[in-house]
Every structure is written in C-alpha cells, then in structure tokens.
Amino acid sequence: MAGRAEQKQTAEQNTEQVVDLSRQRLKVLPADILKKPHISQLILDRNRLKNVTDLRKLRNLKTLILSKNELLDFPSDIGALPYLEKLHLNQNKIQQIPEGILSQLSRLKQLKLNNNRLTDLPGDLACCKELEYLNLSHNLIEEIPETVATLGKLEEFYVDNNKLCKLPCVLFDGGCLRKFTARANPLREPPDEVCAGGLQQIRSYFKQLQTNESFEDKRVKTMFLGASRAGKSTLCKSLAKRELVTIAEHDRTIGIEINEFQTDDFSFLCWDFAGQLEYYLTHHVFITPQALVILVIDLHRYRTDDKDSFKEQVGFWINNVLMRVPDSIVLPIGSHIDLCDKDEVQKKKKDIEEKILEVLTEREDNLKQRLEKLKQKTQCELYSDQVDKLCDLAEYSLKVLDLIPIDCTRYDAIIEAWLKILESVRNKDIFRNAVRKLPVTYKKVENAIMDLIKTPEVPVHGAVALDELLRMINLHNIQQLKYILCYLHRIGLIVWYQEVKSLERIVFLKPSFLITLFQMIVRHDLLQQLNNIPAKTLKKESAFKPDKQKWINDFQAKATLHHKAIMILVKHQLNGKEDLHDIAEDMLGDEKGNGKLFQILEHFDICLTSKPQALNPDASVFRPGAPWSPSRNAPTLTYLFPSYLTDAKEVSKQWNGDSNDDLHTQAFFLPEIPQGFFHRVIIKLCNFIYSHWVGKKQCLLVCNGRKLLLKEHNEEANSYIEFRCKGNGENDFEGQWCLITMAIRKVEKLIEEWPGLHYSLKTPCRNHDCEHYFDWPDLDEKEEDIEQTSEEKIKTCENCGENFQTELLFCMSRGSRGQNGATADAKSPPTQQNIHSTYNITGNFVSGSCTMNIEEQEFHHGS
C-alpha cells in the first residue's frame, strides 16, 4: 500500500512540474502556486504582473517565463532559484538589475531581457558561466561591459536597438559565439556597415585592428531628394565641382547620379535622386541609413495656401524618409530664391518648417493614441507585441534641421550653404557616427580600387570579375577582401550583389554604369523612348514596325516589356558607345531570361518575369530530366512592371464582385503606404502563386479553387491594403485564412525594410451598415498559444451590438511556422491543355494546422 501511495504522489508531482498561467490577466501570483515547491517550469507570460514576490518558495524551478508583463523591477527572489536554467523577462519595463542576483544563477543558460529600459548591466553577470543565450535588444544600453566576454559558453548574443557606439574587441576574440546582431545602434567601432556583414566580418574587422594601424574615416553619404526640377542636380554638381554649374532642362537627372568631393576634414559621397515618382521604385535599393538627407524644395513653385504643394514638395519626402530611414538627419534647402521676394522667402520658410513639425507631431500623436487604445483593451495582453512595436517606433526621432534658403545662381551663396552643412556634420550631437574607426587595410583597398578605375585595366563600364580584382589589388587574403568589398558596397562606393547568385563573382567598380542601365528601363518617358526607336535600328535587330507597335501596345495595356524591345531600346540609347555594347548584352541576357540586370530587378521586386515554358507539347515521348525543345509557338520573354499599370478591368472581371460570404481583413499603414510598396507585394505574391491577374492597385490570386483579392487604398489618413478571399465550398474558413495569412506574411516580411512604418490588421464589422473594426491580436509564432487565443468563439461588435463567429473575423490558425515557396519541376500538362499561356508550379504554405498546397497553378501571361 505504501508503494502505491508513493507512486501516486510521484505521478501527481510529475503532472504538476509544468504550470502554465499565461494570458490569465493575473495581477498577483496565485498563492496556491507557491505551495507547490516541486514545480520545475512556471509560465506567466502575457499577464499584468507589476511585481513578483515569494518565488524563493519554488526552489526547484528550472524555467521561469515572465515575458510581456508590467514589471518595473527585476524580481530579487530570482536569486534564490539555484536550479534556474531559462529566464525570460523580455517585454517589461525593467530599468535596472541589482548586483547580487545573477551571481546566484550559476546554472542559467538562457536569459531574455529584450524590450525593457535597461541602461547598463550588473558586474555579476560574469558569474553566469553556463549562459548560452543572451538577448538585450531594444534597451537603452550605452556600453557592453567586457565581462560579457568571460561567458565562455555564450553562443547567441543580441543587442539590436540600443545606444551603443562601440563594441568590446574581446567579445569576438575566440569563444563559442556563433550568432550576434547589433542593428540600429550609432556604432563607430565597428561601423554599422561592418556589423551588417555578420559575426565573421566583425571578427575580421577587430583582427585587422589588432595587426594593422587604424584611421578615422570621415565620410558622409549624402542623399539629395526632392521633387522634379527642384534644383538638386545644380546644387549637387556645384558643390562637387567647386564652381557654379547650370543644368539644362534636357540634362535633368534620370534615375540616380553619383558624385564625390572632399573638404578639409570630410568626404561627401553624394547621390542625386531623380524626383519623378516613376524612379522612386528603384530608389529604395540605394536609400540607406547613416546618411545626411538634403531635401531640396523649389521655393518659387511652393504655395503656402496650397495643401498639395506641401505634400508634393515636402510631405511625401519627409514621410518616406521617416518610414525608410527613421533615424536620419534631414536638411531642407529652399532653392530658386532668386525668383522670390525677400519677404516671400521668409514666409515660405516659416510655413514649411511649421508644417514639417506638424507632420512629425501628428505621427507622434497617432502612435500614442494607437498605443493607449491597445492598452485599454480588456484583453490587452493579447496585443503586447504590437505595443512593443509602437514603443520602438516612438523611440525613432527623425531630426529635421532648419531650412536654408539658397540662390543657386550665386556660387558664394552655395558656399555659404555648404559651410552650414559642414557645421551640422561636425556636430557630434547631431551626427553621432560621422567619424568611424577602420583598419588601414580598408583605406588601402579603397585607394587601390580608385586608382584602378583610372587605368585601362578596368573597362568603361567598371564591371570586373572578383578573381580578376583580387589579382589587380594584389591582396592575398581573399576573405578579407570580400569583407572590405561588402563595406564599400554598403557605403555606396561600389556595387557588389553577392546575394544574387549570378552576380556573386562580379564587382561593379563604377555604380554609375549599373544605374545607367536601370534608368534606360525604369524611367518617366519610357513610352516616348519606345516610340523613338528608329526603323534603322529595328532592321539591324531583325524587327519591324509591327513588332514595335505590339511592344508599345502591350506596354500601354499590360505594363509588360518584351525582352527584345528592351534589348533594342538599350542598344539605341547606347548608340555611339561601342565599348558598352558587349557588357550591356551580357547584363540583359537573351530570350532564355538569363540577363543579370533583370535578376537584380527581380531581386529587389521591381519587375516580374514571365519566362517561356521549357516544354514541347508536340513531342511524342516524355523523358524525365531530358531537355525539351521549345514549341515554335512558345510565348516570348516579357517583364511585368506593375508600377506602369493603368487599369484593373481584367482583375474585376475575374473576381466577379464582392460577396457577404468573403473573408475580409485590412492592413492599415501609418503614416501611409510607401510609394511602390504595393507593387513589390504583388511581385512577391505572383512569384509564389502563378495563377494571377494584376491591375492598377489590384491583384487577384487563385489557389486550389480559392480566390484572394488584394486592393491598395492610399488616401490621406486612410491608407490600407484590403484582403478578400472566396472559398471553394462551405466551411472553408481554414483554407481561406491560410491563403490570407500567406499574403499577410509576405507583407510583413516587406515591412521589415521600412523600420519607421507602422501597420495593424483589422477586420471590418460584417454588418455592412456598421463602420466598426475588430483589431487582430498579435500574430504569435507559438503554436501552443493558438487554442488560448481562440477560446472566445463569438465576438460582439462594440458599435452595432451584433454577434459574429470569431472564425469569420480572424485567422484561427495563427501559429504560422513559416513557408516554403520552393518550386518543383513543372509537371507535364494534359495534351489537350493550351500550354502557350499556362505554366505549372508546386509548393506549399503552412499556417498552424493548415497546409496550403500550391499545385497545378495557371499563370495567365500579361493579364
């Protein structure tokens, strides 16, 4: 009998070793929990705990999860838990960790402290000798103590979004560290561009510092932004050439131009961005953080009484810088004051500065209002990730300096403005990382490249094979050279797309050539350029006037460009530049679609390639793995540029109208949807699901009988992307939500490139007379949370009082594990199928318990 009693007691203890009290809205720790000292895992995340006491009674704890609460102080009782191995205190409000607590946690392996208010670390952190994982991201830490380097078993260490200017060298000298990130810090040693290369590049940097001399790199990437004809090029070139430069109307910037010039103490790498919106789609490729943004505003054309005037010349650019590089320094410069009265200049200067302040203040107020709304919800613990994101956004502070009026017809006025620019750059309170510490080898490689460019060894286009560059520079450490090239690429001095497979062995020592190719294809007057191709050029390329007319018609109607049209267009524009023809053909490729330039454009989601299917439907025998001769009637290679689309009639026709049965949700953006963002979403989705129709501000995807419609609405104070899905039968909620979730994941991934952009998911009330929205809870990554977040089966509208099934409002499978967009070999279609415009793909997307199989999908060419 005694044996059975002992077995029963042991069984009870085993079942109670793990206690999960997450999402219980707890304000205090339940007293009965403290009476169970045998507990080994206590999970208390997503509650409302402001302090936790008496934890010393749970001496056997190995795991303690206190994430996403309201803790202000580090619980002192944690020091009395000698067996603790995993401690999560992330997403609280902890400001300090007292000495003497961590020294008691000799077995601690995992410590999460991200998203708090920590300013430093206690010295006894060094006592946690078993620590393998440490996350300190999103705090206010200014210095990492060298004692962290004594944690000999530390494998993962994250310090993103802090106030760090310097990393300790000893941290990267040997040890077990294999994962490390320090994004969004004002780093000077090593520079942010070095840290972006990853752990091995950081190690290489410090190793070079130890074996070589160092120098202070005083270079500022300067981006000239502003509306078309504002005077950016005049200002930029006048500064670079140290003389007054007048730009003719026909010489205005197309795409981007690059200039560099040196002052006594600083070097300025100037990127002059064209102002037409057609080019903004490619700008995001080159707009980078850690830069001075000079916003040029035409004061002569600016109207204080015209709301659109501010939006077009100032507001649009401020918002996009705020979303893309939110910690930048913006210097507004008012041009063309020679055409204005003196009083008019001051009036417009004051108006612009006041309205910029209004934009920044309105953004701050909107974030605060959204934050308060989430905190006041009855189940606010379900929105803690969104709360943290809002808090992070509030930490960003776009610094806009006072506007400088300038008369670009007077060189002395340009010099005066330039001295004010220098004064700002030299101010360490404004530019915290303008001066960066680098190994002297970085400078030697840069100088060697600059010298090479001037020699006949480097062709006019500046594209050089990586192996050949190694030989030219005579640097024996290949990996070291690669790290230095990565750095030079990130600061904008060269271009090396090592992440693009076909380009990983090519370095563009002259970025201007690559940009020249960009601007030949993505330009505001592309239709005019197609019309201007002369008959003589067509004849040379075995094309005729009807061919050109088809290219023009397809571009106007479908926003598609034929590969041959692009080849001829580029050759025509390069007429007389024979030294560029060979590399141009190599970059553009052939009808098989192996052009390197288009792989870059695809990599950055600028165009969508429609490749001819490599199958021959007329063949009598199918041999798996053997090459097939293409059909004589195979479709030609074309590229879709969604930004040029003009209507959505075909999309509307295929969608066949909204229905009350559609599952419907919306992603709202603050302050607005970035220019070109929706086009990039379209390209990502259409690359994943081949059955699609695309129109202006609309996209329709079809998968396994389900239809998903995306629509862009980008009105002022009402910017959102709409998702609507039609099922393939009754009670198809899970499949429909899986398709919607896949699209949302693509949007979320893209949003990562706009760190200053806020978005939230909402579902409109299904009572069409009601204007209320239901806020989506956090999209968790933990599958075990799904059941708890979906306990409430009925949602009641706060406005109209109607009840709705939760599955009609939110995705019930929120535990997305990821996605696999891999494309298998195309299957042989049925012989009766017209494959000239139909391609097949297989793949899958997993969302919680639901798997969306993408199989036998049709691609409707040119729709």
Image (cartoon, grey):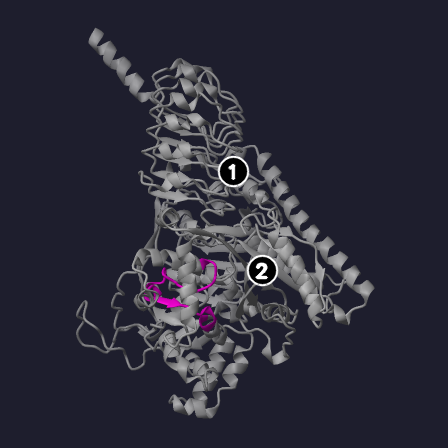
Q: Give above or below for 652 relative to 208.
A: below
- In the rendering, at what x and y percent does residue 15 appear? 31, 21
Range drawn in magenta? 490-514
Residue at position x 65%, y 72% in the image: 229
Q: Is residue 421 above or below residue 71?
A: below
Relative image position of residue 776 (x, y in whole percent): 51, 43
Mark-to-mark CA distance, 2 and 1: 31 Å
* Residue that protrudes farthest toward the top in the picture: 2
> Do the residues under discs 2 and 1 have CB atoms within 8 angstroms?
no
Q: Is residue 860 visible?
A: no
179 sits left or right of 776 in the view: left
Quarter the N terminus occupies = top left
- Residue type at numbered disc 1: Glu
Q: Nearer the viewer, residue 168 or 56?
A: 168
Write down the residue under mark 1.
142
Tell me the residue at 57%/50% (across/down).
327
Secondary structure of residue under mark 2: loop
The one of 326 and 399 positioned closer to us in this rendering = 399
Q: Quadrant of residue 615?
A: bottom left
Of pointers 2 and 1, the one earlier in the residue sequence: 1
Question: Is 496 covered by the magenta stretch?
Answer: yes
Q: What's the amino acid at mark 2? A: Asp
Whether residue 321 is situated above or below residue 773 in the rendered picture: below
Q: In this rendering, would 355 be left or right of 658?
A: right
Q: Viewer-proximal residue, 469 or 77?
A: 469
Q: Quadrant of the C terminus?
A: bottom left
Per the image, the residue denoted by label 2 is 264
